[in-house]
Amino acid sequence: MNQDSILCSLVADNLVSDPAGARGRLLREAARLFREKGYERTTVRDLAAAVGIQSGSLFHHFRTKEEILKAVMVETIRLNTALMQAAVDAAGSHRDKLQALIRAELESINGQTGEAMAVLVFEWRSLSEDSQAYVLELRDIYEQLWLDVLEALRGEGVLAADPFVVRRMLTGALSWTVTWYRPDGGLTLDDLTEQVVAMMGMTNSGA
Amino acid sequence: MNQDSILCSLVADNLVSDPAGARGRLLREAARLFREKGYERTTVRDLAAAVGIQSGSLFHHFRTKEEILKAVMVETIRLNTALMQAAVDAAGSHRDKLQALIRAELESINGQTGEAMAVLVFEWRSLSEDSQAYVLELRDIYEQLWLDVLEALRGEGVLAADPFVVRRMLTGALSWTVTWYRPDGGLTLDDLTEQVVAMMGMTNSGA
DNA sequence: GACAATACCAAGCAAGCGCTTGGTTTGTAA
DNA sequence: TTACAAACCAAGCGCTTGCTTGGTATTGTC
């Protein structure tokens, strides 16, 4: 189950917009602009111009500007949950599962969906309370993947700290890479993954 | 050299506004509002109302709204650099210095200056390029404190990963606590500090 | 008590915002 | 060819925004 086929099946189930379609293209441009200038500073005129239509025409596809933000976040979290699940399933030991999760999250933050992931982190407050509650439900599924693996490692004695705290710390550490990591800086995502594992005192030699 | 005396000496040097004065009170309220609603969503009318004056009167103290944001960031980073420096100087071994830095940063993020620190992280893009450049200069001094300690630990063989990467990861992990840590949740800042140290495989027993 | 300088108010301007409206083009299928 | 819906345009409304302006209290100093 590779990344493309996961995306395809989500598109087929109508859980994620086809990136080639009008809606998908708009959401990608929206993610780019929201990331670049922030949600509030991005006007509906900016969004419309980015896909070559008039600002009023946006409201044929979305009822409000906030609905666009919500769609960006919801589709991103759906896609990434599926990718994470696949990464966990493909790995063997719990240690490998953790490494796979770290690698996958770094990929989602610094790869194709990076702009949307950054929006998820930095534009959270711009989402209405109702939308926040909905996205939080989706996030819980995603987070449980991590906690299961971390708790297993804790049980094995490989991990000294509390799984819940560790996950929160990793969330921050990995999200933050979006502000400084550049793929052309002589450090690959695999290198970075290894650095994180090393930082946790869980290098390949051990455990 | 305790926290209050550090603050006092900065106020005396005019590097930080007196928290009791008009300007200091405005900056504190600004930090609170920027953190709560975001910079863009906070209007000059909100800011003025928070300190009990008319919106136009704000512009007697600051030339633009952005200047308020800049002042919040600059004064915060100045204060925290001084606090960090004191924390490092007071600690003995390099391991203790790292723990002191972690403890101090957690304190600055989740304590009195927490709102301003969150603004520094989440409202960065709202700062003009010129202001960004200025704040970045201040940040470099601050960051060097960390790198010196991490490089020493690396030299001692206690730290397996690259100091630069580790600092970036710690920045993200510690900053992120602002989104989830609550002092009344049965976890003190000292507990949290220990968790971070434990997560890095550097518990007290070792090194 | 005179006199600046500082701090503030009341009112409002110009620009930009999200969104609406009424009407036109485009794609699709009988 | 006709019928109809989806996609889009051109125009602009009502409101909010950061900021300005001209004037009035308040404060400190000699």
Image: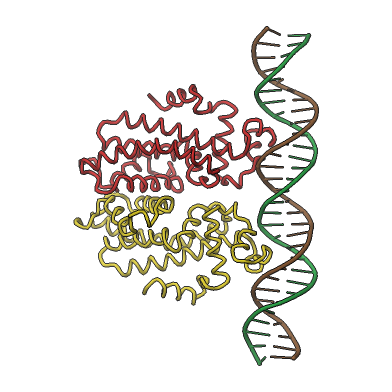
Chain colours: A red, B yellow, C brown, D green
Quadrant of residue A153 within the rendered picture: top left
Q: Is residue B71 above or below residue D12?
A: below
Report x, y in % for residue B23. 57, 70
Q: Is residue A180 above or below residue A204?
A: below
Quadrant of residue D7 within the rendered picture: top right
Q: Is residue B187 left or right of residue A70?
A: left
Q: Is residue A133 left or right of residue A96?
A: right
Q: Is residue A127 above or below residue B21?
A: above
Quadrant position of the N terminus of chain A in the picture: top left
Quadrant position of the C terminus of chain A in the picture: top left
**At 53% across and 43% down in the image, what residue appears?**
A129
**At 41% across and 68% down in the image, what residue appears?**
B82
**At 62% across and 66% down in the image, what residue appears?**
B52
Report x, y in % for residue A201. 25, 47
Quadrant of residue B102 within the rendered picture: bottom left
Q: Is residue B153 left or right of residue A106?
A: left
Report x, y in % for residue A68. 58, 36
Report x, y in % for residue B194. 28, 56
Choose between B153 and B26: the one closer to the eye.
B26
- Marks counted in the figure total 0
